[in-house]
Amino acid sequence: MRTAWLKIRMGLCVLLLFAVIYALLVVIATFVGAGTPLIYALLAVVVVAIQFFIGPKIVEKTMRVRYVSEREQPELHRIVSELAMKAGIPKPRVGISEIPIPNAFAFGTSKRTARVCITRRLMEMLKRDEIEAVLGHELSHIKHRDMAVITALSVIPMICYFIYFSFFWSGIFGGGGRNREGALPMMAIALIAFIVYFISNLIVLYASRIREYYADAGSAELTRRPHALASALYKMIYGSAAGVKQEKVKKEMGSMRAFFATDPVTARRDLRDLSAADLNRDGKIDEYELRAFAERARVTRAERLMELFSTHPNPVSRVKRLGTYL
């Protein structure tokens, strides 16, 4: 039931975003003619198509992915094969990322073209059950097809910003003399487009957080060990927060952080919030610690407000929810 509700919320985000962009196009059509919305609709299709075709290559290059054979990494392939079979999806291509951030990610345009990758540093940090839990999370992204959904949704704020930019400058440079009256509708559309851009961005971020909860639930369902995922998330956050050299990498990976299982940019703050779950300070979260943390941990209103502008859920909320799957 919890998983079904997450799926419903993801669907509502999709409907809401397309309703918002449709409303904006209707406003433009009202002011400047019915032909204009078609141009922006076609632009959206082109941008989505480009992202679908070249997106995986960009991710591969940015994340320094090297695909590995079963001969090179037999245990990693074995885990992915078992999880893919349980999830009822084709086995994705398996890769290792050489970026010095302990994390994992999945990408691709469909279940058949999907790739799942784990960084070498994370493999060195995690135990087998934790690796299995993280890969279960990533394969759940593939199973739910949310990678393609987020790709499509992320285009909408881009289109809204393009509309804002175009009409704003058209209004300024077309506002002199006889064209002054015609500039007012242009500026009005620009203002509406900017407001829609801001709102649609918040919706995309919300959808991104929902998909992380959804993948966490999928991992718990596949592995039956939600505490292993909680422990892996804790180790990922700890590893990303440690070391001055990480700052440069975080900056370089900033545009790709939505792909990661945890957000390396907020790692230090997340570690401070999540360290309370590690009762015996042994660097991991076991089943007892997860259960105890889920019962007593609280998220403040300020933290909930900050979460509105984040690609990932608050780690306390996320681990608390994992505790409900025990």
Image (cartoon, grey):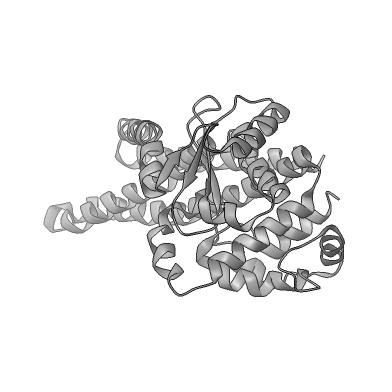
In the figure, residue 246 lies in which quadrant?
bottom left
- For this orientation, the residue located farthest to the left is 177
Above or below 269: residue 132: above
323 and 244: which is toward the camera = 244
User: Could you tell me which residue is drawn at 80 percent across and 72 percent down?
Assistant: 279
Q: In this view, does 235 lie above or below 157?
A: below
User: Is there any visible trace of residue 11 in the rendered image?
Assistant: no
Q: Position of residue 113 (x, y in %)?
A: 49, 27
Q: In which quarter of the image is residue 37?
A: top left
Q: Where is residue 117 in the image (x, y as percent from the top left)?
A: 52, 43
The answer to whether 293 appears left or right of 114 in the picture is right
Q: Can the viewer see residue 182?
A: yes
Q: Is residue 35 left or right of residue 324?
A: left
Q: Where residue 161 sits in the image (x, y, percent)? A: 36, 51
Q: Residue at x 75, y 52 (%)?
A: 228
Quadrant in which residue 292 is drawn: bottom right
The residue at the point 37 percent across, 39 percent down is 30
Question: Considering the image in quadrants, where does the N terminus appear?
Answer: top right
How many marks can you see? 0
In the rendering, at what x and y percent does residue 179 appear?
16, 52
* Depth order, front residue of 200/239: 239
Question: Looking at the picture, does residue 54 appear above or below residue 284?
Answer: above
Q: In this view, does 12 lie above or below 185?
A: above
Q: Residue at x 59, y 61 (%)?
A: 308
Q: Is residue 137 left or right of residue 60?
A: right
